[in-house]
Image (cartoon, grey):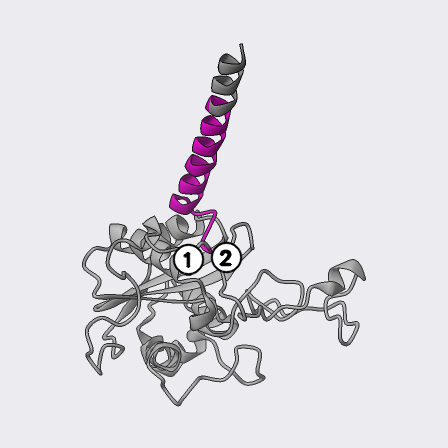
Amino acid sequence: MLKRLAALLLSTLFIAAATGCNYEQLAQHSDTDYGSRTAGDPKMLSGKAYGPVSGNEHQHDNAFFEYSSVISRKVTDLNGIASAIVMLTDKNAYVGLMLDWTAVGTRNSGGKSEQDNTGTTEGVYNHDTGSPYGNSRVLVSPYNSYFSVNDINNLSDELKQTVAIRVRELAPAVQEVHISANMEFMNYFNEFAKEAWGGRSLMPWIDTFNTVVKYHFAGGKEMPPPITQPGTYSPSEAQMDQ
């Protein structure tokens, strides 16, 4: 009787351990966990799919760019991402992300979001000023917004790898995949996307696009002014200047 009881107890322990291991493995494989960062993590076993790989100093001198609605939707479908805007060029894919914290570990430790959403509990938009008004031109704002992360290095490597692999599955010809969840980066990408949604050419905006991506991914010194800054013109206005 004691032997049978011991065997049953041991069997229960084995099942519980196996269940725990299976759950951990499923979480590591899934897009609900970008924060395990353990040796041999399945998300990171393949070669690095994002960031610079060519060493070409002119990698971000793009000749054209276009909005990809299909890839944008597929990346948006990933857990942890509220919205994604993907632009394809003759060389690269560029991904702007807006985060929603529906997955674990989307940002590295020390990575701070740029939002203050405490106004939602007070019935105001801007918690600092008490203003009820937002800016309809921007997609991501400092107040009452989905989340952004200023520095690309503070985004989880597993998140960037997962996004890059999905992009490469749908656009295998791209040389490099560059990813940012920076607020201004995402707001510029939103402006570009609105032009594409309106059926307008993005070519009048190519110089600004290259300036934006160089600033974020190649240490560029020049950055276009914030979308919210008075006098910042839209892509449509840029097109009229051509």
173, 78: nearer the viewer: 78
Can you give x and y, in whole percent of width and height, for residue 98 in the image? Answer: 50, 61
**Residue 161 against residue 78 in the figure, above or below:** below
Report the side of 100 relative to 32 (left or right).
Answer: right
Can you give x and y, in whole percent of width and height, for residue 144 in the image? Answer: 67, 63
Category of crowding for the residue at label 2, using alpha-carbon neighbours closer than 10 angstroms: few (below 14), some (14–19), many (at least 20): many
Cβ atoms at labels 1 and 2 below 8 Å apart: yes
Can you give x and y, in whole percent of width and height, for residue 43 in the image? Answer: 34, 51
Which residue is outermost to the front? Answer: 2
Residue 37: mark in rendering: 1
Report the side of 126 relative to 142 (left or right).
Answer: right
What residue is rendered at 52% in x and 80% in y? 226
Going from N to C along the chain, the mark reached first, 1 or 2, is 1
Tell me the SS state at disc 1: loop
Which residue is label 2 attached to?
A: 105
Magenta residues (range): 11-35
Mark 1 vs mark 2: give the one in front.
Answer: 1
Badge 1 amino acid? Arg
